Image (cartoon, grey):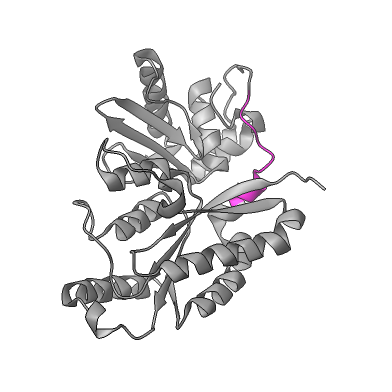
């Protein structure tokens, strides 16, 4: 019978030499859904370039993947065997750029490296060097597991997914807020608690940004393009490509207001990626649940 569930997207990141493993990841996700989705009220949705992209000549290919697929994903599963992939102009490879972007906003990454022998005709010294460097980087961060064959990868991922769903802060935070929906009515400004170290007021736009970030992934992003400015918090978009200049100015001021109050902090020093502070979470806890989204 039908049941309500929240959908979490799992982005499958890899070079082109692990097609069997990509299929194994999808099988592991399907296995998790079959066992847990009804009882947990969660459905995991596999996302990848082979099923969710189309040919288009409108910009840097990797940027389109980042914007249209990766930015909406909740978990990233990365797979490597004999190569890292093709440089993007901004990273060693598209796969590594995806991993770096995903980690920048505090979302979970699960990495798997194949130990299977590499056929002589597939060995590329430059690719192998870059792969070893990236593997060392991942090892230092305690980020990865190894496997010998796609079947082992499928089995390991099936075992690891319940742990990730239960213990990862980002994922558990998403699940704890699964009953939250964007509000449809405008509210007046909500006074901040004394426990949040401020007696001033943050406007309704700032409150909505903060609440959406706090119940989402803890981040506020400001992305500026030739076509406009995109501002998002958690999983909510507060401006879009067709937003008018007044709306963009209004939401930009809200981001600045939150930063000035110490409720979010600039993580890269460029005014592009902000993270909710401890004080910000305290304030967000004082706000109504229906503030988690645009008015």
What predominant SS class does the magenta segment belong to? loop
Give the residue at x 51% y 51%. Answer: 74
Give the residue at x 38% y 13%. Answer: 246
Where residue 289 sits, quadrant-wise, is: top right
Can you give x and y, in whole percent of width and height, for residue 202 in the image? Answer: 50, 24
Q: Is 106 positioned to the left or the right of 212 in the image?
A: left
Q: In which quarter of the image is the C terminus?
A: top right
Can you give x and y, in whole percent of width and height, for residue 54 in the image? Answer: 38, 43
- Please tell me which residue lies in front, 131 or 285: 131
Can you give x and y, in whole percent of width and height, for residue 19 in the image? Answer: 41, 67
Magenta-highlighted residues: 173-183
- Please tell me which residue lies in front, 119 or 267: 119
Whether the magenta-drawn stretch holds residue 283 is answered as no
- Please tell me which residue lies in front, 52 or 109: 52
Q: Is 274 positioned to the left or the right of 201 in the image?
A: left
Count of residue discs:
0
Q: Can residue 197 be seen in this view?
A: no
Where residue 133 sits, quadrant-wise, is: bottom left
Where residue 244 sits, quadrant-wise, is: top left
Give the residue at x 52% y 69%. Answer: 24
Give the residue at x 33% y 59%. Answer: 95
Can you give x and y, in whole percent of width and height, for residue 167 in the image? Answer: 60, 63
Instruction: Establish if 219 lies above or below 146.
Output: above
């Amino acid at each position: 019978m039908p049941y309500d569930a929240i959908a979490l997207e799992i982005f499958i990141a890899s070079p082109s030499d692990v097609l069997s493993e990509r299929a194994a990841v999808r099988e592991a996700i399907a296995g998790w859904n079959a066992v847990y989705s009804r009882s947990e009220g969660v459905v995991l949705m596999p996302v990848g370039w082979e099923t969710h992209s189309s040919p288009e000549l409108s910009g840097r290919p990797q940027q389109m993947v980042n914007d249209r697929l990766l930015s909406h994903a909740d978990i990233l599963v990365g797979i490597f065997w004999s190569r890292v992939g093709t440089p993007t102009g901004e990273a060693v490879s598209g796969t590594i750029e995806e991993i770096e972007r995903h980690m920048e906003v505090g979302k979970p990454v699960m990495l798997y490296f194949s130990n299977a022998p590499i056929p002589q005709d597939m060995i590329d010294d430059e690719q192998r060097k870059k792969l070893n460097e990236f593997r060392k980087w991942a090892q230092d961060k305690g980020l990865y597991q190894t496997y010998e064959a796609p079947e082992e990868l499928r089995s390991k991922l099936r075992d690891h997914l319940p742990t990730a769903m239960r213990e990862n802060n980002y994922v558990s935070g998403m699940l704890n807020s699964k009953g939250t929906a964007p509000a449809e009515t405008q509210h007046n400004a909500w006074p901040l608690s004394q426990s949040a170290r401020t007696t001033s007021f943050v406007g309704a736009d700032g409150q909505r940004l903060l609440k959406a970030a706090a119940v989402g992934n803890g981040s506020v992003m400001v992305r500026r393009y030739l076509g406009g400015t995109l501002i998002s918090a958690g999983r909510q978009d507060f401006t879009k490509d067709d937003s008018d200049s007044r709306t963009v100015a209004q939401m930009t001021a809200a981001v600045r207001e939150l930063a000035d109050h110490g409720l979010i902090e600039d993580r890269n020093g460029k005014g592009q990626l902000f993270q909710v502070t401890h004080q910000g979470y305290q304030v967000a806890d004082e706000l109504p649940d229906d503030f988690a989204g645009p008015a």
